[in-house]
Image (cartoon, helix red, strand yellow):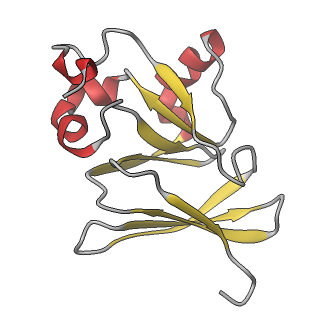
């Protein structure tokens, strides 16, 4: 196990951001739907205003997730003023309050770096704890 998980306080280093490069990393997205299968595959459908297309995010073996309105994330927005996020919409994050409240989700659900995946919109924000990088697909109008 990495030194990140051997720390007794997962948030000791404070909020940290990391890049998650996607085709929509700076797009204006709107959450359309969210579904979780019995095998813990979380599928989130968004709409990209810039691309005028739906975007499907697939998180295989999602261990934890939350959907919050953007106002519920003051801690992250404050931290991003001090250390800017690598992108506006899709990025990774660790060292925040949810991680301190639910450390087992990260120990058993994320990769060795302890980052969660984040999709930020003006309305609803999605954060997912998963070990494998999610897939992101731009869908044609007939999908």
Picture coordinates of residue 69, whole percent (x, y): 52, 44
Check the picture and name the quadrant holding the N terminus: top left
**Residue at figure coordinates x 34%, y 50% from the top left:** 65
Q: Is residue 32 above or below residue 127?
A: below
The spot of residue 20 in percent (x, y) is 58, 41
**How many badges with numbers are in the image?**
0
Q: Relative to 79, is 115 on the left or the right?
A: left
Residue at x-position 54% and y-position 16%: 79
Residue found at the very far bottom of the displayed protein: 142
Compared with 126, 39 (above or below) is below
Q: Which picture quadrant has residue 105?
A: top left
Residue situated in front as seen by the camera: 43 or 122: 43
Q: Is residue 45 above or below residue 29?
A: below
- Residue 109 is left or right of residue 114, and the answer is left
User: Percent position (x, y) of residue 112?
Assistant: 30, 33
Q: Residue at x 81, y 69 (%)?
A: 52
Left/right of residue 35 with respect to residue 126 in the rendered view: left
Quadrant the C terminus occupies: bottom right
Residue depicted at 72% across the width and 54% down the height? 23
| Figure quadrant of residue 47 | bottom right
């Amino acid at each position: 196990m990495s030194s990140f998980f051997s720390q007794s306080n997962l948030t000791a280093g404070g909020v940290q951001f990391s890049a998650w490069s996607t085709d929509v990393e700076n797009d204006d997205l709107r959450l359309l739907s969210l579904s979780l299968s019995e095998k813990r595959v979380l599928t989130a459908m968004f709409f990209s205003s810039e691309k005028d297309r739906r975007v499907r995010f697939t998180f295989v073996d999602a261990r934890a997730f939350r959907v919050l309105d953007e106002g519920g994330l003051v801690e992250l927005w404050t931290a991003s003023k001090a250390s800017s996020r690598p992108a506006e919409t899709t990025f990774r994050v660790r060292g925040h309050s949810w991680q301190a409240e639910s450390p087992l989700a990260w120990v058993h659900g994320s990769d060795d770096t302890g980052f969660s995946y984040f999709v930020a919109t003006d309305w609803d924000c999605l954060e997912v704890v998963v070990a494998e990088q999610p897939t992101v697909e731009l869908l044609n109008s007939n999908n």
